[in-house]
Image (cartoon, rainbow, N blue to C red):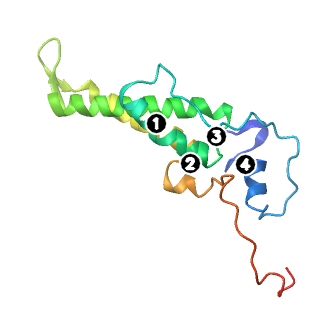
Amino acid sequence: MAGVKGRSGRRAKPTAKKELAGNPGKRALNKDEPDYGLVTNIECPEWVMGHGKEMWERVAPSLCKARVMQVTDLHNLEIFCMAYDRVRLAEQDLRANGLVVSSAQGAPMKNPAATILNEASRQMATFGALLGLDPSSRQNIVGGGNKKADNPFGALLGG
């Protein structure tokens, strides 16, 4: 699938993240990038329940503390947590009923919970990556509290 306005390949890193990393590429920064407001504390919405609420309470404080959550990222966190709830519920169903169940006509069929588990796992992977919740995408996230200390030997080297 082609990217927007002819762009393809890796997604661009937001300007704030480039600045926090010291702009390692030394390219011109986009000074007109929108700021949607940093989220520093957020309660779990009432529609995120069960295991999803437990996940929210584990993940949201860390994302806020790292200063990487903006208002426009909240839906990613909601979908991630709701998918986690579905994963847990589908796994419980699979353990209770097995991979093969009887259809309405009595024939053996794949347990629909297996499909739900698969789809919810994919959603978790996709939306978790957008939030930097897996090892490979975490390396691309630079939070506000991760600023590197100055190198004490940099002055000696002329840097």
Q: How would you rate the neighbour count of disc 4 (Cα within 10 Å): few for under 14, some for 14-19, many for 20 or more?
A: few
Q: Is there CB contact under 8 Å for labels 3 and 2?
A: no
What type is the residue that disc 2 sits on? Gly
Dots 2 and 1: beta carbons under 8 Å?
Answer: no
Q: Element under label 2? A: loop
Residue 38: x and y, percent?
Answer: 70, 38
Give the Cα separation between the discs numbered 4 and 1.
29 Å
> Is residue 52 depicted above or below 16 in this figure?
above
N-terminal of the pair, mark 4 or mark 3, is: 4
Identity, as a three-letter code, of the amino acid under mark 3: Met
Q: Which of label 4 and label 1 is nearer to you?
A: 1
Q: Are marks 4 and 3 in contact (CB under 8 Å)?
A: no
Q: Which residue is mark 2?
A: 132
Task: Say which of 69 and 141 sits in front.
Answer: 69
3D distance between C-alphas at marks 4 and 2:
15 Å
**Nearer the camera: disc 2 or disc 1:** 1
**Residue at image mark 3:** 69
In the image, 80 versus 61, the foreground residue is 61
Q: Amino acid at mark 1?
A: Glu
**Circle 4 is placed at which residue position?**
12
* Residue at left offset 67%, top offset 31%: 72
Residue for point 54% across, 29% down: 43
* Nearest-to-viewer mark from 3 and 2: 3
Which of the two labelled residues, at mark 3 and mark 1, occupies the earlier sequence position?
1
Dot 4 amino acid type = Ala
- For disc 1, the marked residue is 57
Left or right: residue 128 compared with residue 53: right
Q: How many marks?
A: 4
